[in-house]
Amino acid sequence: MSTVLKLTDLEVDFQINGTVVNSPLRGMNLEIKAGKTLGIVGETGCGKTLTATAIMGLLPSSAVQRGRIEFADRGEITSKEMAEIRGSQITMIFQNPASAFNPIFTVGEQLKMVAQRRNIARNQIDALLVSRLASVGLKESKRVLDSYPHQLSGGMLQRCMIAMALISTPKLLIADEPTTALDATIGDQVLTLMSTLQKREGFAMLFISHDVSAVAKVADAIAVVYAGRIVESGPTDQVMNWPQHPYTRGLLGAIPSADKARGTLVAIPGNVPSLLTSVVGCAFAERCSLRSDKCSQEPPIVQINSQSVACWEVGK
Amino acid sequence: MKILWNRLSSALLVLFAASFVTFTLARVIPSDPSLAYIGPKATAADAAQLRITLGLDQPIPVQYIKYLGETLHGNWGYSLSTKQPVLQEIIDRLPATLELVFFAMSFALICGVAMGVYAAKYRGRIQDSIIRILAIAGVSMPAFWLGLLLQMLFAGRLTWFPATGQFDIDLKYDNPITKITGFPIFDSIVTGNFAATVNGLHHMVLPALTLSAYSFGLISRMARANLLEVMSQDYIKVARAYGLSERIVFFKLALRNALPPIVTITGLSTAYLITGTFFVEQVYNWPGIGSFAVNSLISIDYPAIMGITLLAAIGYLVINFIVDLIHAKLDPRVWMR
Amino acid sequence: MSFLFKDKLTGTATVMMLIFIVAAIFGPWISPNAKEGAGATNVDNSYIGPGWQHLLGTDELGRDLLSRIIYGARPALLIALAVVGFAAIIGTLLGLIAGYAGGWIDNLIMRVSELFLSFPPLLLSLVAVTFLGPGLINALIALIISWWPWYARLIRVEASIIKSKPYVEISAAMGVPDRIIILRHILRNVTTPLIVQIAADLGTVILAAGSLAFIGLGAQPPSADWGLMVAQGRNLIFDQWWISTFSGLAIFLAVLSFNIIGDALRDHFDPRIARQ
């Protein structure tokens, strides 16, 4: 199976006048195969969205990027090259559909702009938009296309955004917190929709969320991010059922569920480290119950079954 | 539609209230208005007689109704200083002021938006700082001082432009403008009298520049701030994520989103412009409403003052109305509930 | 307070404002020629251009222009403080009353405010001062009349927002009388926009007062009012240019510094539009 996206040691710093002020990404390594979904989970601020921004080549000028990004058959790709395929072979959907659409243009006009950018023949655009809307479950295409964003509900807008993302039949779809701003039931519908679409159209998906249960529903594999690094990754059911990294365990322990009705929610003590201070060694060490002296050094990636875990204490 | 009706009715209400307030002020303040009509040499008996003639012995509400009736019939009284009907004076002088306002506003709008956008694009750099200083200087400058300064520099020292007046005095004889609409420069273009057009524009430069300073400041500041805010919105990020070129993102999307508040501030600054004409026309001897207003104020010409106040209130309301309409057209969120 | 010097422009403005305040307070002591500043004439010295004897020249009555301008700082500052002060106080009181009382009192006060606000600002002052008669005090009153509505509306809007907030209900449920809650919260929420508006208004009022004086409806001779001085030098602008130029420059710089400081205050209190 071919690889659609591969990140090798992706690091991002923010610099002002040559001095590093902030290092949000400290070495991201991941790989997504065609037709598969990789879920990225982590707390707010751990660098998930920034990874997506870096992949799309949309980092601001104050950002310095190192590492490799490889995309499909193009191999290693720079931000400039990414600008050409951005929005066609890689598309993205965003957390807040209401603010992602321009309030003074109709949804149809905005979808049309994307289609025109991709040089789709003018007489084919309308038909394409209608079929796209139908595929995301919006049958009243005329009404939707003629509406302004504030006239549609959150769920409908998110479907429109998915439709927009699929106009150009991308190879990779990045979904950044797509269900976070939606009601639980609507969010579920959207997740189901995305899975169905993926099976039908065959795109790979990078699914980013702080909601582990949402990710678990759609992802084939999961990567857990902490402080700009992946601390654990592997097939979804393995990571969910046999988490190896102390952080993952804490994260999963914090999910309320019917089975744990009697137990207490486990919270991980402490806070995510501020990325303004450079981190030495394992970033999670200060909050970890298993910490030892070794943890002042960057832990190695250990393979257990098909999981990769970045921890000194794993396997014990 | 309903919103329009609401605006219209509240506007009319304000108009009535405004005229009533002005009317009452004129009647109620210390000095006796009738004295202005007959001069200081009159006797008490004459004054009393005149009061009855002018209907000043009636209770104020009655006087007001009479005043309203007269006004709606087009009788705005007679100017105490020029002895002409006030409405006629206003109609005669309005075109000169309107043309001046038109040029000043166009300049302020075009330059203001252009510079505001430019400053936003180069935010933080030297171009941005220069434009911001210019803008804040524009809103801080006394119009009369700027006028005098420009007069001294460009008319006095450099003689590039004429110091006063709307046209050269000789124009009446050499190239008289045939009156079609009453707007001199417009008429001169329409009748092919380009010598007059050039002359008129030549005279227009300094006054229009002076008048535009304040509005330019307001508009460019608003344009810059607004554009920056729009550029940081999510939908701009999304547009970029879909590969739309920076040019399309900036001009088609961001600018259109930034326009509504710019339109609003343009309307607001036109209001400032109205009072600005008072001073600018004074300094440049411009034969418009502004200089008429100042003369009326100084000579306490009640009918003229009330006529002008009424006119200003009407103008202000009309401008705001138009601004609201344009605003609604640009931003669908306004009229959709 | 350090934000007042955050960049060169703001720092310069702060310095200018300080000079302005010093001139207003210590005018008589720092003027080169205090008597002339106050109005004493010296006709033999008329129309001397700027030079070593008189840094900014002399006016039509031979008075040292620099002294006159320094003396003009006091009325300018006083008018600004008085107008904005009274307008803010009256406006706040009316706004509070409108907010608390509700009903027809609220309506009345708000309609009246809107009526005043629907006029081009300076126009109202011009008309009012015409009817009251020229003079400094009347100009003051006229300006206060034009300025209070904004404050009334600000306070009233804030009051109505606060009244419906949950924490008011909660405090009321706990037994604190709602008037006190509302007052406390209003004052806290309103402080920032109030300060910013006051700073901006100080500049605008100086401009307006100068404009009134220019037309002849404000301060009267022989007072050293900047607007008046510009008017007095008006017809001499081509030859004895310094009289109007420097007097007007004083107005410009004073207003400019208040506007810049107002901007700095606004940025300081409301950093929502993040500067990179």
Image (tube, rainbow, N blue to C red):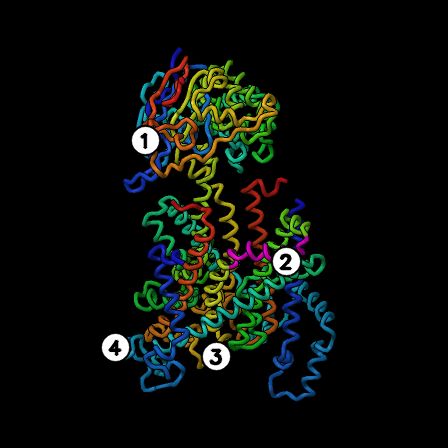
Alpha carbon distance from label 4 to label 1: 62 Å
Q: Earlier in the sequence, mark 2 or mark 4?
A: 4
Chain bearing tag 3 is C
Q: Amino acid at mark 1?
A: Gln
Q: Which residue is mark 3?
A: C220
Question: Secondary structure under badge 4?
Answer: loop
Any part of residue A168 in sight: no
Disc 1: which residue: A65
The answer to if C177 sits in the magenta stretch is yes
Task: Say which quadrant the N terminus of chain C sits in.
Answer: bottom left
- Magenta stretch: dominant secondary structure: helix
Q: Nearer the viewer, mark 2 or mark 1?
A: 2
Can you give x and y, in whole percent of width and height, for residue C95 in the image? Answer: 62, 60
* Distance between mark 2 and mark 1 Cα atoms: 55 Å
**Does the CB distance between marks 2 and 1 fall below 8 Å?**
no
Query: Given the image, what chain letter belongs to the residue carrying mark 2?
Result: C
Q: Between tags 4 and 3, which lies in front?
A: 4
Tell me which numbered mark, 4 or 3, is placed earlier along the sequence.
4
Question: What residue is shown with label 4?
Answer: C52
Q: Give the CA separation, mark 4 to mark 3.
A: 30 Å
Relative image position of residue B251 (x, y in whole percent): 43, 39
**Tag 4: amino acid:** Trp
For residue B36, which quarter of the picture? bottom right
- Over which residues does the magenta segment extend? C175-194
